[in-house]
Amino acid sequence: MRKAGSVDNKEGSMFKKVGARLTLLLGASLVAVIGLVSSGSALGGAGQSCGTVTLNEYGWAGSTANTYVAKYVLEKRLGCTVKITKITEVPSYQAMADGKVDAVLEDWGYPDQFAQYVTKQKTVVFVGSNGLLGHIGWFIPKYLLKQYPQFKTWKGLKGKESVFKTPESGSQGTFLGGDPAFQQKDKELIEALGLDFKHVTAGGYSAEVARVSQLIKQRKPVIFYWWTPEYLNAYLNLVEVQLPPRFKGCNDVGGGGGDVKQYRCRYASVPLKKLFSKEFAQSGSPAVKVLRKFKWPNNDAQNLVGKWITVDKLKPDKAAEKWVKANAATVNAWLK
Amino acid sequence: MTTVTELAPVTPVLSHRPWWRGKLVQTAGIVALMYLAYRAWALEYPWPDRLEWHRLTGHLDDFQTWLIDERNAQDPGFVFTIFNSFATFVDHLVNWFDRLLLWLTWVGTTVAGTLIALRFGGWRAAAWVAGAFATFAVTGLWLESMQTLALMLAAVGLSLLVGIPLGIYAGLSDRFLRAITPVLDAMQIVPTFAYLIPVVILFSVGPGAAVVSTMIYAIPPAVRITALGIRGVPVNTVEAATSMGATGGQVLSKVQLPLSRRTLLLGVNQTIMFALSMVVIAGLIGGGGLGDVVTSGLYTNPALAILGGVAIVIMAMALDRSTEAVANRTDPAHRHLTEARRGRLRLATVATVVGIVLTVTLAKLFGAAAIYPETATAQDWLVAHVQSVLDYVQDPTTFVFSITEPLGTFIVVQLVQPLLQFLVEAPWFTTLAGVTAIAFVVSGLRPAVTTLAMFTAIGVLGMWEPAMETFAQVLVATAMTVLIGVALGVWAAESNAVSKTLRPINDVLQTLPQLVYIIPFVYLMPISYVPGIVASVLYAFPAVVRLVERGVRDVAPDTVEAASAFGATRRQVLGKVKIPLASDAVMLGVNQGIIMVLGVVVIAGLVGSGGLGYLVAQGLQRGQFGLGLLASLAILAMGIALDRVTQASRRTRKEGIV
């Protein structure tokens, strides 16, 4: 399934499409020539037909959904060739700086990298939100609320931590921490809220999914670091535990030490970002315009595609096709 | 605290000293003292803040920032130009291999691989290679497999290009060997995750960067085994050549290299195996191929990830068996070349070349595709079946789960948790003193000094607590590894059937990416620490089995005969003669076991082991270079200490016996 992108590069299927796209190509190259002449810029390849666009996919279902929907639109509507790389988050910034990756469609924000690559060097360009609102929090399965309605807020957890006891936590409750790659401050929060939780790391994303879904299958109590948008929330029927409100200067990046009071608030909700490499942003490729407009209508849309891929085992290409066909209006707005 | 004493070697058989001077007893005494101190002052003396070098992390982060700014400046300096052009060169090389493999078409590649294996390795090797290509086709992972194969060709080729000359030099010069050994150790112990970021900054992402990080891991075996081969050439042969007036260069090219050819080819074999174990991690920085199938399959389609893992294992086994066959064939001892045979071989070579050219031409003429046609694969069927097995594993109501879960809980509650609590909560100075004293008792002054220095360094780096968390798990995992490894190794040495059965299992365990087999354990033993420990044990015990088996088998037959002649039963021969005489190999097994367990620490961190492994992963993935590097250095320090202690105890034993 993952082949399709690179197969097109290597096999002859390009040739078949060439005929059908000849008009488009001619038009595009005409624009390119005019563009080159009028701007007098020495930038080779500016404004030419789409060519190859490299998108980077990260290690979670939502990112797969973004990447393949964009791939489908670029390939079927613009005639681009889309290559998908799978470079992990922080190195992908350098990949964009080197022009080896053209675009990332769901960045959760790495403050240091953003400051260095986007703000200072300008080798990576921020091009707005992808329409999703990312939010990290503490989640529990909904069935727990029947027995413990007070778990709706963190205050209700106080004194009841031992409900979440596991063999590794002794007399305390277990709080399952998140993937090492993700921003988190749960150790500090637990301390600041005076809760009797032991912070246990579940490991990477897939390990956390495995552990949590199994506990839920057994209908056991579990409280863990999780986020929206994520297809699993609806699938596993999760609810968020309300944490204290935000205040000015509240810190979300744990691990820095200092007074734990500065972390005593819920995580901020952040619009998820689209990032381009500088080279791609300036290339004048028609894909730039479309990806700039690429935007999910809401979190649920992405969750749906994510569920098709992971739960229903639809191949990402097929899932993207299904969604694009059902949401023609949204997609057409990107192409205007 | 049985686990601590596991590290101590078995009490010497030939010892005539009073019982209270035995190493085991002394170690137990030290542990008892440590335990008393723990009871008295638990939690009262964590590693003191004053003894930590807090600003180091900041300095390292600043260095990284500076490096990235220089790297991406309008006009990057000369140094970066060199790195860049090397990366571009390797990118082109990999792409060239990749295109070549696809250009040959799937029919051509299969036939070419099989015929080459047939010519140089024989029928069995050819069967393995053909089987491997069939696997790539049936699993529908042809393209990914070719990408990985191209990456391997480049990485192994370049590793040998660097490793063999260094190995030859290390074989000739003692001083150079001494100088390079710690560097090679570091290259193998420092977790790959730690240098992925620097590699990306210097070489960008893509096949080039993937090849560089693979080379860092795959060069050490090439150097070590080459040096071993050169050193294995009998001294009198070299002397004979020198006395006949051969120059140094002539001795090397006409005597030492030809005579060590078999070892050199085994070095190639090991380099390939080490390189293949990096496929998945190289995928994180743009290596592509099967590594991508595994990493991205893990969260969207675990069954496909398992198929990817299987393809990697089959590729590894085919490469291993065929290079081994080639190595054995070129062994001068097995090769009696007559003029007629030489002629026949030449003919076979020509036939091979003609066969390949013919197949490729025909394949091209009949329009065979570059990639095995997707419609003819059994991928969907395989994925569905693997998925049903996974569904069974995930089901917490099955019989299997009712056994595995309590077992996992037992390991954590009875073994890891108490040890962890003891190591983390005991006053830092008693732990430090205790570990040093045990090192002294077990293996002498120098290793004790090394241990003291290394553990102090861990504290100064600010890694004391996570390091103790990791240390506890490493001890438990090593104890289990040694227990299983020695038991199976001895059994395999005594029974050929067992040995034959174990070999493929060992191969699978050593080459299957840990992330693949670890996932079922996350389901079956859903408790932090356990999947990580299981992964380390599964990865490390095959090496122990191999070393122990070889050690026991290599015990001189006349010694065994003598013992039997005195009326010793088979069990007595084994217990009183073979195992004690093989204790060297056993200790080497312990040593290797520990190093390999440490190699899995980071992967274990990704499935809930916490400790240093989690920090290294965090350092890579959140761009906290300083943190990741310090945690890696702590792993390295722990590795050096454990390595020196187990290595030296082997040496003291040897000296004691001889």
Image (cartoon, coloured by chain):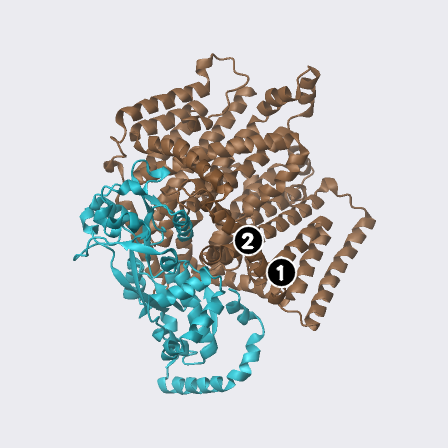
Q: Chain of mark 2?
A: B
Work out which residue is located at the far left of the displayed protein and give it: A248
Nearer the observer: mark 1 or 2; the answer is 2
Amino acid tagged 2: Val
- Chain bearing mark 1: B
Q: Can see residue B109?
A: yes
Q: Quadrant of residue A311?
A: bottom left
Q: Which residue is mark 1?
A: B137
Q: Which residue is denoted by mark 2 in the rendering?
A: B386
Label 1 Cα crowd, 10 Å radius (few <14 / some 14-19 / many 20+): many
**Picture coordinates of residue B624, whole percent (x, y):** 33, 52
- The hue in which chain B appears in the rendered picture of the protein: brown
* Rendered shade, chain A: cyan
- Total marks shown come to 2
Whole-percent x, y for residue B173 in the image:
54, 39
**Residue B615 at x, y = what percent?**
35, 46
Tell me the SS state at disc 1. Answer: helix
Q: Look at 67% across and 72% down and name the residue there.
A: B367
Q: In the picture, which quadrant includes the C terminus of chain A?
A: bottom left
Question: Residue, x 42% and y 67% (percent of image)?
Answer: A67
10 Å neighbourhood of mark 2: few (<14), some, or many (≥20)? some
Distance between the alpha carbons at the discs numbered 1 and 2: 17 Å
Q: Residue at x 38, y 79 (%)?
A: A329
**Foreground residue among B488 and B66:** B488
Hey, what amino acid is under mark 1?
Ala
Q: What percent of the width, then of the height, locates residue B140?
A: 59, 61
Is disc 2 placed on a helix, strand or loop? helix
Q: Which mark is residue B437?
A: none
